[in-house]
């Protein structure tokens, strides 16, 4: 009873403090980068302890090579009477020449624990006629990047500690350098249509899902994805490869869903592994060309392996080896090792 009374008394006192210090704080500011001597490659670094980083391109022409719009709104206890310096350290803004750097660091403040509302957004607007190296990281928050048609980027790195990452890429966009997306806790999503990935893609998340959706893309190197706890979903439609490449995707705990639809020449051989330590793996494969074949070498420790023909079929299963009838004679092939320790493997396929 004494302990309960202390808890109630303490909770009441804390509630009184929160109510007495309730308030609202807003802050907006814009930052601009316009180099005196533009570089052939502009390098941009964005780093934030908290908040959402949105990267987009200008719709109408602009003089600035980069514009950063910071928008902060905090509502809750411990906010009344506070100023910017009570929540954040001064912005680090280095914009004399490339590489530029924008950094938002938070101070310890109870509002970030007990605050009712936090809206901290960093909107980055880039020019369509400039080539960038982009390095963006948010410790607690998300990153959204939207790339329109006909954009050329160099190296791109998007990362969070806790928060999601979403990248949308439109047609005729080229990632000429490396592309990496990683988070400790959060989902990673990529939606790419008619996009060129010259140096492939590397993705990783410890806790969260991985979604990769490729449509009519050109791949120049390996596709790699790893998840500790979470599902993997990959959709591949009419891919064109610049050379022989590798797919490696694995989750420790979670399901894997792979869909490969190949109705045009792929011009290379794709090998790799698809795996889950604890979880089921579902594969849908379909091609319409005798020059393309597929083979899935499946293994499970505890679970089952099954194959279901898609329409007229053209594939067969023998002791866990699922192959298209034209695999041995095909010019280009998908060849995967598929494994799970605990879970089933189901392949729905057709190869004409």
Image: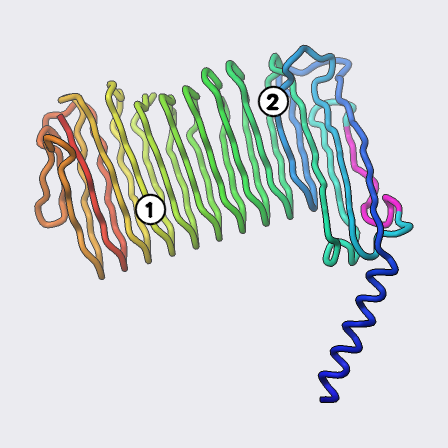
Magenta stretch: residue 84 in it?
Answer: yes
Q: Where is residue 4 in the image (x, y as percent from the top left)?
A: 71, 83
Q: Residues within 10 Å of mark 2 (few under 14, many from 20)?
A: many
Residue 182 on the magenta span: no
The residue range painted magenta reads 83-94
Q: Nearer the viewer, residue 170 or 270?
A: 170
In this figure, which colouring scheme has been used for the structure?
rainbow
Q: Quadrant of residue 321?
A: top left
Q: Where is residue 67 in the image (x, y as percent from the top left)?
A: 72, 23
Q: Which residue is drawn at 37% across and 33% down?
A: 222
Q: Residue 328 carries which label?
A: none
Residue linked to disc 2: 132
Residue linked to disc 1: 256
**Residue 283 in the figure: left or right of residue 156:** left
Instruction: Tell me how far mark 2 sits from mark 1, CA to CA.
Output: 34 Å
Where the N terminus falls, by quadrant?
Answer: bottom right
- The picture places residue 148, in percent across and down from the top left corner, at 54, 19
Residue 211: x and y in percent read 42, 39
Q: Quadrant of residue 260?
A: top left
Q: Could you say which is closer to the camera, residue 198 or residue 324?
A: 324
């Amino acid at each position: 009873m004494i302990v309960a009374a202390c808890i109630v008394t303490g909770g009441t006192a804390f509630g009184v403090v929160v109510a007495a210090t309730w308030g609202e704080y807003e802050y907006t500011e814009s930052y601009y980068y316009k180099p005196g001597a533009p570089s052939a490659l502009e390098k941009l670094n964005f780093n934030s302890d908290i908040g959402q980083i949105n990267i987009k391109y200008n719709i109408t022409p602009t003089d600035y090579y980069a514009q950063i719009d910071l928008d902060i709104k905090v509502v809750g206890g411990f906010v009344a009477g506070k100023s910017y310096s009570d929540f954040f350290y001064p912005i680090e803004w280095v914009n004399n020449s490339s590489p530029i750097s924008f950094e938002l660091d938070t101070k310890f403040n109870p509002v970030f624990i007990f605050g009712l509302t936090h809206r901290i957004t960093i909107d980055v607007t880039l020019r369509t006629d400039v080539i960038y190296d982009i390095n963006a990281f948010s410790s607690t928050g998300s990153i959204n990047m939207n790339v329109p048609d006909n954009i050329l980027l160099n190296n791109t790195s998007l990362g969070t500690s806790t928060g999601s990452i979403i990248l949308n890429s439109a047609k005729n966009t080229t990632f000429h350098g490396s592309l990496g997306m990683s988070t400790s806790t959060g989902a990673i999503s990529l939606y790419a249509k008619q996009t060129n990935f010259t140096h492939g893609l590397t993705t990783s998340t410890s806790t969260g899902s991985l979604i990769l959706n490729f449509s009519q893309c050109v791949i120049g190197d390996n596709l790699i994805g790893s998840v500790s706890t979470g599902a993997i979903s990959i959709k591949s439609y009419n891919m064109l490869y610049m050379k022989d490449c590798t797919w490696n995707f694995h989750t420790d705990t979670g399901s894997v869903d792979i869909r490969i639809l190949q109705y045009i020449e792929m011009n290379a051989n794709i090998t790799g592994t698809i795996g889950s330590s604890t979880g089921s793996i579902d594969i849908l494969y379909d091609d319409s060309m005798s020059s393309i074949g597929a083979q899935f070498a499946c293994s499970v420790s505890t679970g089952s392996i099954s194959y279901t023909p898609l329409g007229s079929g053209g594939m067969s299963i023998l002791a866990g080896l699922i192959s298209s009838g034209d695999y041995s004679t095909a010019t280009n092939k998908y060849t995967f090792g598929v494994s799970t320790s605990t879970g089933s493997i189901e392949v729905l396929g057709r190869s004409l």
